[in-house]
Image: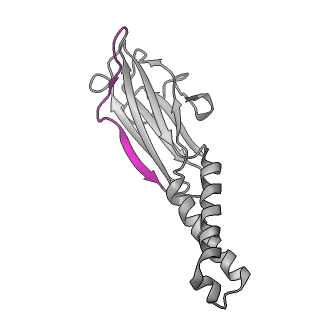
Amino acid sequence: MKKFTLGLLFVALIAFAVGSPALAQSKTSDRTLLTRIARQLTKLQRTVTPPEKFKLSSGPFGIPDGAKAVDWVVLNESATSQDIKVTVYMLNSGGTNSTVPPGPLSKTLGAKESTHNAGGVGDVFKPGRYYQVVVEASSRSVLPMVTIWESTVNKPIAGTTIPAGSWKELQ
């Protein structure tokens, strides 16, 4: 659908340019005219076609005994800046899932930049409950990970890491 719409815009732009009396009287070469049209089309494409968004899910995970914190990290492996939004949900059996504080976090990550957030078990995360981390991004080069720590200083509990390759894309 987007390609069809952009094609129609391109045809309309050419029809306007060819039918324009000002352009017909100018001494502009065909190559210059096509270059101008291509630039205008690129500008239109940027405004008409928003970047596609991807939603990635960690899947449900529980809080094991001895856990002190849950940490998520997102790495932008792209060569360009990427907008991300990270939301952590507590899964409520038989009810609506609830957002965990501090709520959805939105940020622009520069190329090769990362960000993270850790929440304490007992404060933000409750033992015996299930959680899910959802990352929304505009590039598949955004790589998320979740780890559960046995202390409050990045000491992961063995077997609790959910690496980037394990995340499921949501529709």
Q: How many marks?
A: 0
* Residue 4 as seen in the image, left or right of residue 51: right
Residue 35 position in % (x across, y down): 67, 76
Q: Nearer the viewer, residue 133 or 47?
A: 47
Position of 39 relative to 53 (above/below): below
**Residue drawn at the location 42% of the way across and 38% of the way down:** 86
Residue located farthest toward the top when viewing the structure as drawn: 94
Location of the N terminus (image quadrant): top right
The answer to whether residue 36 is above or below residue 68 is below
Lateral position of residue 168 relative to residue 114, left or right: right
Asked if the magenta segment contains residue 144, the reply would be no
Residue 64 found in image quarter: top left
Locate the C terminus and report the quarter of the image it occupies.
top right
Q: Nearer the viewer, residue 50 or 110?
A: 50
Q: Is residue 107 magenta?
A: yes
Coordinates of residue 85 in the picture (x, y in percent): 42, 41
- The vertical placement of 25 against 13, above or below, is below
The residue under the point 61% across, 83% down is 23
- Which color scheme does this rendered protein use? one colour
Task: Using the image as rendered, state which of residue 28 and residue 169 is in the foreground.
Answer: 28
Task: Please state the extent of the stretch shown in magenta in the rendering.
Answer: 94-109
Q: At which x and y percent is residue 11?
A: 65, 62
Position of 13 with respect to 29 (left or right) is left
Residue 151 at x, y = what percent?
A: 38, 29
Q: Residue furthest left?
A: 123
Vertical relation: 17 (above or below) 116 = below
Q: Residue at x 47, y 36 (%)?
A: 135
